[in-house]
Amino acid sequence: MPFDKPQHVISPSLWALAWKRLVASRVAMVSLGIVAAFLMLIALSASGLIAKDWARETGVNYAPPSFLGEDIEQAGQPAAPGGPISASDKPTELPIQDPLADAIADIRGEKKAPGSEAPSGESQTVDPLADVMADIRAKGTQATVAETRASTLPFGADKWGRDVLKKTIKGSETSIFVGLAAAFVATLLGTVFGAVAGYYGRWLDDFFNWFYSVFTAIPYLLLILAVAAVLQQKGTLTIILILGLTGWTGTFRLIRGEYLKHKGREYVQAADAIGASNGRRMFVHIFPNVSHVVLVQLSIYTVAFIKAEVILSFLGFGVPVDVVSWGSMLNEAQNELILGKWWQLAAAGTAMALLVTAFSLFTDELRDALDPKLK
Amino acid sequence: MVPEMVHYAPFIGGDRMLEAVRPWLSASAVVLGLLLAAPATSLAADPQKVLRIAFEVAETGFDPAKVTDNYSNQVTQVVFERLLSYDYLARPMKLVPGAAEALPDVTDNGKTYLFRLRKGIYFQPDPAFKGARRELTVADYAYSIKRFVDPANRSPWRFLVDGKIVGLDDVAKRAAQSKRFDYDAKVAGLEIVDRYTLRIRLNQSDYNFAYIMAMPAMSALAREVIEAYPDDSNAHPVGTGPYMLKSWTRKARIVLEANPDYREVIWDFVVSNDPRDQAAVAAMKGKRIPQIGRVEISVIEEEQSRWLAFQRGEIDFIDRFGSFAPIAIPDNKLSPDLAARGITWDRSVEPEITYYFFNMKDPVVGGYSKEKLALRRAMILAYDTAEEIRVIRKNQAIEDQMPVPAGVVGHDPAYRSIIRHDPQLANQLLDYYGYKKGSDGYRNDPSGKPFTIVLTSEPQATSREYDELWRKALDGIGLRFETRKSPFSDNIKAAEACQLAMWGSAWAADYPDGENFMQLLYGPNSHQSNHGCYESAAFDEMYVRMKNMPDSPERDRLFLLMSRQMEVDGAWKLGVSRYRNVLVYPQVKGYRYHPINTAVWEYLDIDPAARRQ
């Protein structure tokens, strides 16, 4: 019953038809749901509503997931002989003046007895910093209270005792954001270059083709590492740029082909006849007819770049030290796995596998929906 | 604590040498001779015996005057020879003659050293010798020492001889003016008495000079070879040692082969009570050095890859596997799994320290004003070494109190530093000196300008753990922090140029004396081994005094005073001394870890039958 309402036969738009086909596919809906859930998660985490305190060390080192129970071997590795210096050990006294000694004595509220190196408890006078000190001490005790660390956490803890669940959420935020943003940059570059090359042809086409050939002649991972080495600076923005600037080539070829095909069509000639400018013909007339290709490219890239970020971080070229991503988590997990601490790998791996699979399936369905003839 | 310096353990008994030669005198005597000689002279190195090992950091080159890293030095150790060497088994470590006939005659209160070279030592063949056999003479040692002060070499080892050898500084000064170093100029302190006798005269008495003469940097190089490859001496190591460089893929793979011309040296070390020594002696005594015909070194930077390579039997022994200590040696015992495969475990505390230096010339962390001292002190107080040992090093290290580690002269186990991990005090210190927090929650300098602490580190996964610990420490006291990543071999070059604000590395003893550690802080060694360009008049004065003193309690006290001076100036965040855990497959015979001559390959044998397929 495709035409239920025969009153006014309005030919539905490409997008409406595609949406209809999409809704009809169960796979598409489920995967869209998963992707949407992830997007919601990162929106919440970016706005600071959840996982804001991911860097807090709430558990013991390598606290196992709750369902495994406490790790009895936690204390397994005894301190090696020649262990730590006890707190009661006083520094060896030597006749060398510490230029900061006065400041430290001042801070500690200790006044030195004249002529003596050792601080004397008796000669305490009014401390000018007493208020500040009391404040600091109060905060200090608070911190100590919070120090009591859980022996298990819902998804375990990493080596510093940070909650793996929160870390995974925070890592998802970085990885997905990087994936989406880099995909946007790459698709934008590819589309603009492809449109210009395909539409104008001639030397502009040659130029962009040459540019494209140079880029694709270099092995991809090598290219990424080279750009990373040149940029030097580390940061999320750098990774987005690296991936975006190196990844546009696929879209470029596709869009160039589409523009080559479309620019001779009757509707473009008609637009030309009514005096539409080049820019208008390229982006107002032709672009909507190729935009489904762009959309599919965008989602393919998102998946690819999420994986690329993981690889970069795994190789140590990725996110800086105060940022967590799936890649940096997997990097840490390399050694943990052999020690039998599998939970960080499991959490980051599962999250990534889930999103990437869902996104890929959704992309597939999207392409089918937008271009039914291909099926 | 004080190693005995003078101890003579002959490598070769004269009789055995005769026995080795005798079989070749007449055909009829061959069979008899072999039978007689069998226990004492086993055959020379067998090319079928291949030792495969891994370096955790890439080498930088093989010119002993130019390389300082342990990995390059391991190769130069076996390719070249020093006049003196160390006994393989003796602990505390003992000097023995290397290319010299005997330990030097030390006279004139430690100012004159007389070395007598063994005759009949020949260089490995090289095109630079134009087909002739080239004998090693003491002139080669004099030449190699002069190379340290040749400005063209920019040798990081210059500190070893600077101001030390009579007349050498004058030649160096003239070279600095004329831009050309005159190797033919007479140096009074390097007197070549005859082809085989070298008399070294020092400006001041130095009782450590014999140790210095055993360092890889003091290898003998042939002048012809250096002049044949003027810009690439790092790639052409031609020496007289037991091995020669067969092939080299930079930063990836090094293959060494036994030197067929290596003089006859027989494995003969005095056995101690240690069962590991006894096993080595049982397996090796009387064999000719070297037994292993080929050493293949792969550079495997990732710890996990190294561990897996060891597990699969792709390398014959492994050291430095800290992250895997909990499964390899749980409860400080060898795991039953590894023991069942015949793997043995060799542990010792390294005579080494790890440290992070602060660059005193850096606009952010450097300087000697109280504000800067407080900033550095705060960072040092904030960093939690105990957590580093527990979490990252899996308890396979001990915290250092002074820059002179255990097992080295000058170390005092009772010494306690003024540094205790105390982030609260760190915060208060910064408050006290006016490092106020800005709107972003991070501190600005006393003039109100924001600043960032930059730590340089390596791209490996393990480095990130230390970066994280630093980030935690500095976050806790409100300092902005970032890391810059580049390979170790690049970092060391930048550090020597005093270009890094902050970098962590380790220093292993070149010889068992505290001077070797304190020189890392000696002002005039800036731009060489003093990577932080730390310059303190008080420290330098004590250092010079210490250097001119024989081993004594006064000298030991100077080490404590220097340690304290370094602490109050905040030159370093002193780290740990690691345990050296080595796991060895059963096919490797005779392995004992030597803390200074770390390349012990010439003393080993391989039993191919014991190698698991």
Image (cartoon, coloured by chain):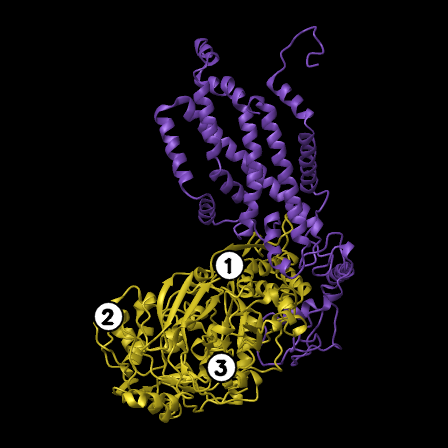
Q: Please name the residue that numbered disc 3 is placed on.
A: B512
The colour applied to the residues of chain A in this rendering is: purple
The residues tagged by marks 2 and 3 sit, at their Cα atoms, a distance apart of 36 Å
Residue type, numbered disc 2:
Ala
Answer above or below: position of A150 versus B200: above
The image quadrant of residue A75 is: bottom right
Name the residue at 60% across, 40% down: A177
Q: Is residue B63 visible?
A: no
For the residue pair B122 and B541, the one nearer the viewer reads as B122
- Which of pointers 2 and 3 lies earlier in the amino acid sequence? 2
The chain letter of the yellow chain reads B
Q: Decide if residue B35 is on the left or right side of residue B501.
A: left
* Numbered circle sitting on residue B128: 2
State the separation of the CA atoms marked 1 and 2: 38 Å
- Letter of the chain that mark 3 sits on in the rendering: B
The residue under label 1 is B458
